[in-house]
């Protein structure tokens, strides 16, 4: 059986507030059709790919933001994407805001197989930003108000002939994210993101957004011997410039394909999962070289403790 997955990273340009779900669906379906025509096995869409990045506005009554969330996946609006996936025999990964029947709000990604059946959900674990209105910022990043952090943990699923994991945006900056999945034998991690170029708590980082994005995903890939597929929603959305730079990164840490625009753009690469073993069986042979007894503080403690 082939261990090659042809991946399509379907970067999106901005989604403005006035754009409807139907407007967005057309763009997702066009990118999916292009991915199928380029022989992709799977197409990966960004974080919160159905709406504008609404945590940039603080709504004192959170229920007035309910229309940004999905209460079903698929719904009558998203069903055509599932139908097209089945017709074109292509899997997909899609980020969206989830509102559960019992009132929980998560920043979620779904992985859907070529038969259009849901394989897995992943709910964002590292939720950045702030809980309350911060009027001094030029725009809000109130993800911690709109989403609760998942308690479900990082999953790795047998899918597409390999071991597939998921993470969402800020998760990619944390080495623990990759390592927990690395310890489950992950071979490809799918990651959607929205990264504003301006970081209000420390604007000295603004010029480094592209560098930091590559730095964390390339090192996470290399240190765990896994493919990483990072997919942006970039460009100027409601006056906020966001990073593009979607990339398909090999287990060597090399970038094999990268977006050239900050608009809707599909990049593809034929990813050989067996390449992972070059790293998993040598430098990063975890069973042989790791020293978990030396790392106990990583799970025992949250912040810095000076001893
Ligand atoms: N959507 C995100 O998680 N964005 C964060 C920003 C706020 C730093 C990121 O890590 O890119």
Image (spheres, helix red, strand yellow):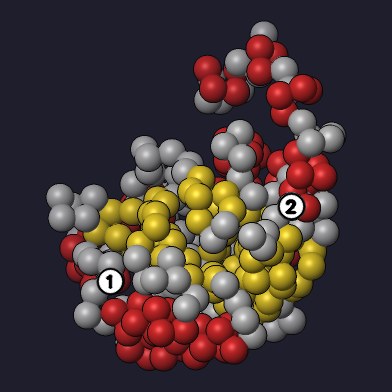
Horizontal and vertical percent position of residue 185? 61, 40
Q: Which mark is residue 74?
A: 1
Q: Quarter-wise, where is residue 306 in the image?
A: top right
Tell me which label, 1 or 2, sits earlier in the chain: 1
111 in relation to 154, above or below: below
The residue that appears at 52% across and 17% down in the rendered structure is 300
Horizontal and vertical percent position of residue 251? 76, 52
Local packing at callout 2 (Cα closer than 10 Å; few below 14, some 14-19, many 20+) is: some
Q: Quarter-wise, where is residue 176 in the image?
A: top right
Q: Nearer the viewer, residue 234 or 6?
A: 6
Horizontal and vertical percent position of residue 153? 43, 38
Mark 2 lies on residue? 274
Quadrant location, the N terminus = bottom right
How many marks on residues? 2
Q: CA distance from mark 1 to mark 2?
A: 33 Å
- Tell me if label 1 and label 2 are in contact, CB under 8 Å: no
Horizontal and vertical percent position of residue 116? 37, 71
The residue that appears at 33% across and 89% down in the rendered structure is 22
159 in relation to 242, above or below: above
Task: Find the residue positioned furthest to the left.
Answer: 102
The residue that appears at 57% across and 57% down in the rendered structure is 161
* SS for dot 1: loop
126 in relation to 291, above or below: below
Q: Quarter-wise, where is residue 209 in the image?
A: bottom right
The residue that appears at 33% across and 53% down in the rendered structure is 106
* SS for dot 2: loop
Local packing at callout 1 (Cα closer than 10 Å; few below 14, some 14-19, many 20+) is: some
Q: Nearer the viewer, residue 107 or 287?
A: 287
Task: Find the residue positioned furthest to the front.
Answer: 1
């Amino acid at each position: 059986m082939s261990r090659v997955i042809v991946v399509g990273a379907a970067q999106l340009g901005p989604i403005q507030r006035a754009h409807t779900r139907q407007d967005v669906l057309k763009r997702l379906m066009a990118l999916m059709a292009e991915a199928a025509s380029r022989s992709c096995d799977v197409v990966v869409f960004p974080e919160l790919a159905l709406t504008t990045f609404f945590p940039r506005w603080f709504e004192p009554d959170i229920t007035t933001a309910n229309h940004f969330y999905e209460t079903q996946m698929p719904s009558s609006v998203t069903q055509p994407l599932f139908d097209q996936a089945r017709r074109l025999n292509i899997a997909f990964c899609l980020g969206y805001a989830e509102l559960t029947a019992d009132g929980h709000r998560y920043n979620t990604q779904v992985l859907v197989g070529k038969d259009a059946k849901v394989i897995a959900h992943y709910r964002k674990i590292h939720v950045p930003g702030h809980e309350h209105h911060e009027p001094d910022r030029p725009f809000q990043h109130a993800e911690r108000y709109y989403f609760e952090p998942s308690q479900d943990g990082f999953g790795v699923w047998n899918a597409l002939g390999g071991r597939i994991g998921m993470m969402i945006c800020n998760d990619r900056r944390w080495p623990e994210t990759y390592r927990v999945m690395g310890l489950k034998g992950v071979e490809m991690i799918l990651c959607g993101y929205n990264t504003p170029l301006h970081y209000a708590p420390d604007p000295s980082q603004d010029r480094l957004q592209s560098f930091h994005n590559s730095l964390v995903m390339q090192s996470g890939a290399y240190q765990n011997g896994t493919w990483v597929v990072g997919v942006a929603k970039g460009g100027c959305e409601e006056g906020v410039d966001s990073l593009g730079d979607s990339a398909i990164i090999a287990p060597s840490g090399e970038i094999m394909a990268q977006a050239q625009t900050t608009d809707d753009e599909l990049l593809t690469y034929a990813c050989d999962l067996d390449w992972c073993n070059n790293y998993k069986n040598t430098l990063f042979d975890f069973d042989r070289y790791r020293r978990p007894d030396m790392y106990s503080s990583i799970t025992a403690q949250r912040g810095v403790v000076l001893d």
